[in-house]
Amino acid sequence: MNNKYELVIGLEVHAQLLTASKLFCGDSTTFGAEPNTQVSPVSLAHPGTLPVMNEKVIELAVRLGLALNCTIVQDNYFARKNYFYPDLPKGYQVSQHTAPICLGGHLPIQTSEGKKNVQLNRIHMEEDAGKSLHDQDEKYTSIDLNRAGMPLLEIVTEPDLHSADEAYAYLTELRKLVRWLGVCDGNMEEGSMRCDANVSVRLKGATTLGTRVEVKNLNSIRNVKRAIEIEAERLIGIVEKGEQVIQQTRSFNADNNTTFALRSKEEADDYRYFPEPDLPPFFISDEYLQEIKAAMPALPAALQNKYISSYNLPEYDAAQLSNDKDDSDLFEAIIRHTTHYKAAANWMTVLKQYCSNAALPVSSFPLTAEKIATLINFTETGKVSFNAASTRILQELINSPEETPESIATQLNLVQESDESAIEAWVDEVIASMPDKVKEYRSGKKGLIGLFAGEVKKRSKGKADMQLTNKVLTEKLNN
Ligand code: ADP
Ligand code: MG
């Protein structure tokens, strides 16, 4: 990018909430149902129907607001945003656009440029519209109203992002957080999390904002990044030619990596907002706020810090463990029964692989955390190799959970020889049988240690504790 310019980005994210029913009626929110099967008279806007507030939506909005350090607004009401579109049966969208439930706040991100807090503008609740399907029929557009009335949170940043990488990091962190809190499944491909990117450029050092374009139809975080990169180049091209940027809504085409204009803002509608008369205003009491705060899980950033400072884990492990709540829940449960933190972190990789092969969520791992901790402790004493424990013993334990790691290791003849004198005997034999190699080793070919260790393993029929073997070998060879 031409470094005379600064890129300015503001993101609007729509997150569909993980409630069982819609925002103002009992229709199911399950994804993928047959079109128009989750449409009660309320969703269809039949005359005489009235909305009823789904309280769970308020709880999720507040939960996300607290996690993002927002100010929670206690006096709330909904407004009507009036416009005509075939997928909007009421002819208006019920939204908090004019009076959001959460104000301000920030989300910490990290990029190769360092750490920063992305400043938020607001979070508000609103209902979704139905879906127009233009490719089902040659002559007609089809409408699926299952989505009409689904609860959404719109999370809006300040124009505070300055590169495609920052936008990528922000969306990755935000998705992690909404999943963590059980607010939204974060699935951009299915459209349950959607993002519009507002992009402008200005000369470095300028204090006013340039004219922005808004890019829609971004169905993955990677596509948001690509679209921003394309728009940055396009906008700079326009400015460099001395032309004016037109405020526009554009669409991203992932097939050929381009954007094209959908409409210009001159045609912007007047939505004639007014307070929704069918829903009473509502107040969030201090007690209710306290209740939600008390039920908040520990957040990923706090856990990551704890793993580093209290358990001495490397930054990479700490980040991995705090990426997903199921993972950190299992890890936390395991370390209630063992203090081998680093080993437990390593074991998480094994357990997750097992679940992925068995198509199981990590939360349904088939052994109790206590049993897993027993296996970890058993392995850490050197009784069995990590390799044997993580493959054969783990599987046997799952097959027969009434057994112990020790009984299985004995039955399968996997208990390692960790008696130092036995190991020394094998090491002496090996050293005596390979005088030439020993000479080479002693004159500097240290890589031969693997060969000697392999010989010990053979002589012990695979039972020698390899950690101990290596220690004894190094001692004897260096003498
Ligand atoms: P609208 O609802 O009409 O799209 P908003 O004021 O809600 O307008 O802004 C939408 C988003 O656009 C916000 O994230 C905001 O930070 C961002 N934004 C506003 N102006 C600019 C600009 N000049 N350049 C980049 N982003 C901008
Ligand atoms: Mg907008």
Image (cartoon, rainbow, N blue to C red):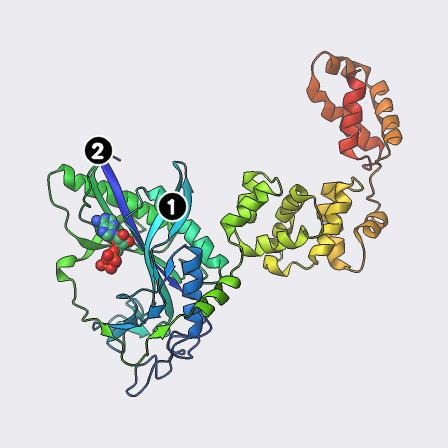
Q: In the picture provided, is 331 more to the left or to the right than 71? A: right
Q: Confirm or deny contact between disc 2 and disc 1 (CB under 8 A).
A: no
Q: Amino acid at mark 1?
A: Asn
| Residue linked to disc 2 | 4
Residue 150 percent across, percent down from the top left:
37, 71
Q: Secondary structure at mark 2?
A: loop
Nearest the eye: 476 or 230 = 476
Q: Is residue 303 left or right of residue 393?
A: left
Q: Give coordinates of residue 220: x percent, y percent.
A: 38, 53
The kind of secondary structure element at disc 1 is strand
Residue linked to disc 1: 117
Q: Which quadrant is home to the N terminus?
A: top left
Residue 424, image x, y percentages? 86, 26
Q: Position of residue 423 (x, y in %)?
A: 85, 30
Q: Quadrant of the C terminus?
A: top right
Q: Quadrant of residue 154?
A: bottom left
Which quarter of the picture shows residue 399? bottom right
Q: Eyeballing the image, is 461 above or below 120? A: above
- Farthest-out residue, top: 443
Residue at 76 percent of width and 54 percent of height:
396
User: Would you say 450 lies left or right of 64 here?
Assistant: right
Q: Earlier in the sequence, mark 2 or mark 1?
A: 2
Q: Which mark is residue 297?
A: none
Q: How crowded is the residue under tag 1: few (<14 C-alpha within 10 Å), some, or many (20+)?
A: some
Residue at the image point whose x is 58% and y is 53% from the top: 327
Q: Spot the residue most to the bottom.
A: 48
Identity of the residue drawn at 70% across and 58% down:
368
When the figure is inspected, residue 460 is found, relative to residue 431, above or below; the finding is below
Q: Nearer the viewer, residue 428 or 69?
A: 69
